[in-house]
Amino acid sequence: MGQNNRVLVLVVEDDLAVRSSLAFSLEIEGFKVRSYATGEELLDVASLDGCDCFVVDQKLPGLSGLDLIAKLRDRHVDAPAILITSNPSAALCRQAEKARVPIVEKPLLGNVLLDRIRDMLDKVRH
């Protein structure tokens, strides 16, 4: 838990209950969390420096999750991103794989998301 104290995870999820639950569970694990309801809200943030990981819902109002991640990459924001969604189509899986964005399926059971975040952060650090 101590190693996560400085890790900032940005969560983009339009469903308030899911967003609050994600933020709560990540904070319990020692992560700092900032959450946003839409991709546009996140993009309005002046600086995304210091973000270590993004957790982004695919089905957002306005920009989709993958479109948001593409816009972040266009801005040279290279922190790892994880896409969360229910029942991803084969086409979405291919798009995410091409963009090198792993998908974690909803409902988020057990520690699947947490494990994926830790795995991605470990890869970035090594």
Image (tube, grey):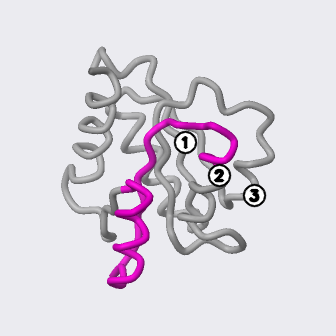
Query: Is 56 in front, or is 5?
Result: 56
Q: Label 3, secondary structure: give it.
A: helix
Measured in 3D between alpha carbons, the distance from the residue under mark 1 to the one under mark 2, in whole angstroms, is: 8 Å
Picture disc at residue 36: 2
Q: Quadrant of the N terminus?
A: top left
Cα–Cα span, label 3 and label 2: 9 Å
Amino acid type indicated by mark 3: Glu
Q: Position of residue 71 (x, y in %)?
A: 66, 54
Tell me which residue sits at (31%, 38%) in the image: 120
Which amino acid type is shown beneath numbered disc 2? Tyr
Return the residue found at the far front: 98
Magenta stretch in the rendered image: 72-101
Q: Earlier in the sequence, mark 1 or mark 3?
A: 1
Q: Nearer the viewer, mark 3 or mark 2?
A: 3
**Position of 45 compared to 91: left or right?**
right
Residue located at (63% from left, 37% from top): 76
Judging by the rendered image, the residue that carries numbered circle 1 is: 10
Check the image and report above or below for 110 versus 54.
Answer: below
Q: Quick check: 53 left or right of 74?
A: left
Please say whether residue 5 is one of the residues in the magenta stretch: no
Report x, y in % for residue 114. Answer: 28, 44
Residue at numbered disc 3: 40
